[in-house]
Image (tube, rainbow, N blue to C red):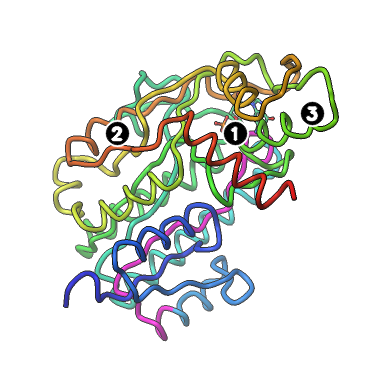
Amino acid sequence: MSLLDKKIYVAGSTGMVGSSVCRELRRRGYERLLSTRSTELDLVDQASVDKYFFRERPQIVVLAAAKVGGILANNTFRGEFIYNNLMIEANVINSAFRHGAEKLIFLGSSCIYPKMAEQPMREEALLTGPLEFTNEPYAIAKIAGIKLCESYFRQYGCNFISAMPTNLYGERDNFDLNTSHVIPALIRKFHEAKFANASEVTVWGTGQPRREFLYVDDLAEAVVFMLENVDAVGLYEKGISHLNIGSGEDMTIGELAEKIRSVVGFQGSIGFDTSKPDGTPRKLMDVRRIQGLGWKHKTGIDEGLRLAYSWFLENIAR
Ligand code: GDP
């Protein structure tokens, strides 16, 4: 049976990442896609997840379901972030094993690395130092997911691998100012300020932290690339537990704010609220490993921000 004919379950297909992965799979000719809504299947509930895998027996699983949020949500809902993510990962990965999935790709985040990791962050930097406090519960859950995949390979031989993307943005992002990441938050703030003729937009923190960003459709291409080209044996035997996925370029939050101001066309100034946390000083991925295997991002930040703003205009700002 060719890979194109396999039954693929994309957990989290209603979210920004999962929906982009589904679009990319369809574009590449994969047709047997399975998806579930949270109202139909609660991934935190072990018995329901196991029943679903028993019934559907997906051959390939992309684990893009997670409780996610920006710096404030991570720092506030600390219990929910660690509990929900641990449960989703444990349930999906264990049921995939129990019901014979041939391959699983688990998606995490660049916040798994130590706060003071050497930049750019290599895959080997995992578990070499203390984590950033604001997102530690989420990061611990994501590290547990990586170790679940690795351990299921080492004990049972499962072809379960992990991809750690940098900060993502794009179509279907969360634009709620209290829970979103920085790009959708600033798109909304500059857009609303423009139409209210406000004189200033407030950016959280000092504007000095540096972040790397990746347009979500580029991540989806990386996931399909890994599905077709990367296996557990090759990865774990080199002593690597996961692959970084990023653009390899970063900028300060101040520079990002300037770019978004110009995409939106806001004429006023930018202020900084230093009572809000900065988080990690810098989070730049070393992406040489995935690039060496043959994947590279396509969408530059300026084009990506334009795409994200047009999606916001058509779907949120109406
Ligand atoms: P992080 O990468 O986990 O820190 O997640 P975020 O995307 O939420 O934040 C990235 C950086 O952008 C942090 O330094 C924030 O303080 C800063 N930032 C500036 N303005 C905003 C905003 O309006 N919302 C969010 N979420 N972050 C902001």
Task: Find numbered disc 3 in the image and state the secondary structure of the residue it sits on.
Answer: helix
Q: Residue at x 41, y 31 (%)?
A: 300
Distance, label 2 to label 1, CA atoms, is 25 Å
Magenta segment, which residues?
53-74
Which one is in front, 107 or 216?
216
Q: Quadrant of the N terminus?
A: bottom left
**Where on the picture, by quarter, is residue 159?**
bottom left
Task: Judge the density around disc 3: few (<14), some (14-19), many (≥20) Cα neighbours within 10 Å.
Answer: some
- Residue 53 percent coordinates (x, y): 41, 78
Distance, label 2 to label 3, CA atoms, is 40 Å
Name the mark nearer the viewer: 2 or 3: 3
Name the mark nearer the viewer: 2 or 1: 1
From the image, tell me which residue sits under label 2. 123
In this view, 210 is above or below 287 = above
- Residue 249 percent coordinates (x, y): 39, 24
Task: Judge the density around disc 1: few (<14), some (14-19), many (≥20) Cα neighbours within 10 Å.
Answer: many
Is 260 contained in the magenta span?
A: no
Q: Amino acid at mark 2?
A: Glu
Distance, label 3 to label 1, CA atoms, is 15 Å
Which one is in front, 185 or 276?
185
- Taking 111 as reference, is 163 left or right? left
Is 65 contained in the magenta span?
A: yes
Q: Residue at x 36, y 49 (%)?
A: 146
Q: Amino acid at mark 3?
A: Ala
- Mark 2 or mark 1, which has the lower sequence index? 2
Q: Residue at x 71, y 36 (%)?
A: 188
Q: Quadrant of ligand 1?
A: top right
- Taking 3 as reference, is 305 left or right? right
- Residue 32 percent coordinates (x, y): 35, 76
From the image, tell me which residue sits under label 1. 183
- Mark 2 or mark 3, which has the lower sequence index? 2
